[in-house]
Image (spheres, grey):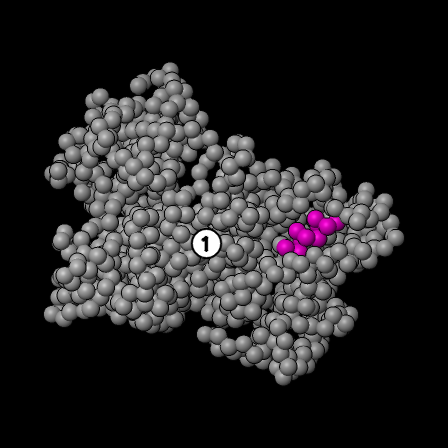
Amino acid sequence: MSGDGALERLRREGRIVIVGASLAGLRAAETLREEGFTGSLTLIGDEPHEPYDRPPLSKQVLLGHASADRTGLPRRHGLDAEWRLGVAAAGLDMAARRVRLADGDEVEYDRLLIATGVRARPWPHPAEAELDGVFVLRTRDDAARLQRRLAASPHRVLVIGAGFTGSEIASACRERGLSVTVAERGAAPLVGALGGVIGQVAAELQREHGVDLRCGIMVTGLEGDPAGRLRRAHLSDGTALDVDVAVVSLGATRNTEWLAGSGLGAGPRGIACDAGCRAFDVRGIVTDDVFVAGDVARSPHALFGYQFLSLEHWGNAVAQAATAAHNMISSSSERRPHLWVPAFWSAQFGVNIKSVGVPSLGEEVIVAQGSLAEHRFTGVYGYQGRVIAAVSFDQTKWLEFYQRQIESAAPFPPDYSSVDRRAEGLQPVPADFPDPSLPTHGPSVTVSGYSPTDQRITFTPARV
Amino acid sequence: MRLVVDLNRCQGYAQCAFLAPDVFAMHGEESLLYNPHADEAQREQVMRAATACPVQAIRVEDPDDAPAPAEGGLSGVR
Amino acid sequence: MTRDTLLRQIIDYDNRADPYPLYTELRKKPVRQEGDELFVVSTYWEIKSLLHDPRISSDARNLSPGAAGTLLQEEEASPLPPAFLRLDPPEHDRLRRMTMRPFGPPETPRRVHDMRGELTRIVADLIDGFGDRKQVDIVDDFSYPFPVTVICRLLGVPREDESRFHSWADTIAAGLDPDPDQDPGERRRVTQQARTELGMYLSGLIDARGSAPGDDMLSELVTGHGPDGQMTRMEVLSTAALLLIAGHETTVNLITNGTLTLLRNPDVLERLRDDPALAVPLVEELLRFEPPVQLLPQRTTLADIDIAGTTIPKGASVWLVLASGNRDPKRFPDPDRFDPDRKDNQHLGFGSGIHNCFGAPLARLEAQLALTALARRLDGPRLVADPPPYRQNAVLRGPRHLEVAFDGLRA
């Protein structure tokens, strides 16, 4: 479409299809209506449920404080959308502007938003993954199943992978009084996201709360009894552990398989889009009618050298969905870039962990306020002499200051005095991130230092 | 009644946990846990919390019988 | 402080009834230097950012000698150590956590919520006490005794001793007031005297609570054990003094300012009468529109801070004019309009950051219940004088008296 008339017609009577009926999809739909889109709106979701919130699943729900089927997201009244729930999108014909559904149906669009998100990476051995007692945690059905099993007081729970989700699951188990072993391939929990220095604090938290934490250990096999129930896990140090529940928390896989062969720049790393959320095709040419938002997107960020970031963050889904929706029904001069500063939170072992910026870019870290030993501190990460990220443990009220430091590329290490600066905070230390070529379980930010328009890159087609 | 808290925004002022303790609870010093689907009978409490939130992080769905207002049927959010 | 500066005009009692036009002038320069080492910050985003800036200290010991000379040295020679209001982390955080244990979440999440019934009864009793009168002083007859009764019960301070500590609280609060016409030496002496007497009074109470604890906060501060251990006796003393004074000198202004604002906006008063739920957003708007704490004169810089084109040097005294930030048109559309339906009202009425008002949830509840009850029960209320006479204090600003005439009481 071109010209104001076409845009006006789109806003009035166009057809917008959103694939992915979770947080990003819902917020995009709401933004479209708030900004005056009166055409037809279709939301397609593979789960049979209305959009629900995922963060409570590993916290309130596992603790039994909230029910898994009652985390539905608040919805705007009068959204006036057609919901196609319980049916996955199976293909995309960009030329015909048509989404094919798993049930064979087809839906035509004038503008398409892809917000298909990610799914839990399953245990790599299918037969073992089938054992009764082996779980993942991503969906509300996953959470309901796991919660039921935890309520039945298993003898010992094994959490495989100590990223944020794994750590939160371990925390909930301990709070329920269950015995927990956490097996983490890296040197400490959360190392992929926060580095080894802060990871050591996470490790202390786990151990102080009675978690049997084993780092530098991989689970090599899960063994069932003749009835197909999990009974034992084998570890890379040659030992075995009797467990009746194992939760696989090995990060996520992006839901892009359905786009194979579509010509869109989609693959295992996500769907590349420009800062205005428009998807790139395989040739590195930006599309004008296909937009991307949420966990499945990767987009260049001005604050981080225009590197492409994939952010599996609640706040990113909210912000990017709003930007994408706005841009879908705006002329090019009114479009906005997605400039959200990455931020996330995690609640585990009674501690509130929050972060701004991209810690995994950090070369060094300094304890700007508080003390690692007290588990109350603000750590600031530096990259090439500037502040690139900050993380707080129970010190969230200071974080907006450090966000401004990131936004203004303030020098690192901080060259000023501040309240609660301790002796340990006078010198930066290496942040101690693992070698990025050996990713640990589920870093929540992935930085890929090239753009799809870069001539040197080769496109990796999705596995079919 | 559905609600969601933007915990990126939340800074742990705990006003919600004071004013609507049946729905919001602090877990440790500054982590917030809440019931994402509170009873309709708790609406008054929840609205007190959402209104008092110093960072306006609480988003509450309006009751089913409410007319669709200009701001989109979601209260307590900018 | 030089003569006739804006700051001096703000402090000047003649402008107490309506400082807002002066704040409008003030905001023309968001960060304004007054004298050598005093900087006044008046715009929303700048205040907000400094409230979250770890280079800002609340500890008077960090003031440079020049900046400290002007004001606020009372506590130097005081018998009481600074309470958490005047401390930085980690001491601030530790003491505030320990004080929170008997007051709020996570350990005591229901305390304030469960006071609703009692607060409602106290309010009803006070209004019943108006009797057959057709005119009352809202301050003396209502908005002062209400929060004082509440803080006394909460802390476990006998209400009958109230007349004794009333004057101490007033004197200590006046010590916060940067009144340039007062002899600083004399003021310091008077304030210290009040602090000493209050300290001795509380000391006796602490002994009594230590041997026979009740379910009040003082007892729990004295006997409580948590992960942070136990407060020292001096810490309990200064914390109790802080809570007692805060309970005396702030909520009274919130309720009085609210009554005044409602009487100046009869349409809103009418709505509140019909819809008590309006009290909730109305009190938030009140905290923006007429905040009981107008400015924070007690911060100092630990490093040079560049803000809004000005460098505030290390060791300077920084005043954050919350009431001015609340009227900043760059943050609040139509800021001089009292609008209880205002959206996204992230006002600075309770401050922000780690020193955000400790008693905020209680103050909110008290103001909501008090204003709702007044709206419902006073028949035909009207102001006798507008503006009413104000208290001297420019920081804790509010009417000294608020005479309200009415036709009678509704049941």
In the image, residue A129 sits, relative to residue C200, either above or below, namely above
SS category of the residue bearing label 1: strand
- Along the line of sight, which residue is nearer the eye, C24 or A29? A29
Q: Residue A168: x and y, percent?
A: 33, 59
Residue C366 lies in the magenta stretch: yes
Magenta region:
C365-374
Residue in view at x 75 percent, y 53 percent:
C399
Q: Residue B66 vs residue A286: left or right?
A: right
Residue in view at x 54 percent, y 32 percent:
B67
* Residue A82 can be seen, yes or no: yes
- Along the line of sight, which residue is nearer the eye, A416 or A437? A437
Q: Residue C162: x and y, percent?
A: 75, 70
**Number of other residues with Cα within 10 Å of mark 1, as a class: few under 14, some 14 to 19, many 20 or more:** many
Q: Residue C59 vs residue A66: left or right?
A: right
Location of residue C398 (image quadrant): bottom right
Residue in view at x 35 percent, y 68 percent:
A177
In the image, residue C229 sits, relative to residue A136, either above or below, namely below
Residue in view at x 72 percent, y 65 percent:
C149
Residue A3 lies in the magenta stretch: no
User: What amino acid does circle 1 point to?
Assistant: Tyr
Q: Provide the residue designation for mark 1.
A: B34
Q: Residue C336: x and y, percent?
A: 64, 40
In the image, residue A109 sits, relative to residue A373, either above or below, namely above
Pinpoint the chain carrying mark 1.
Answer: B
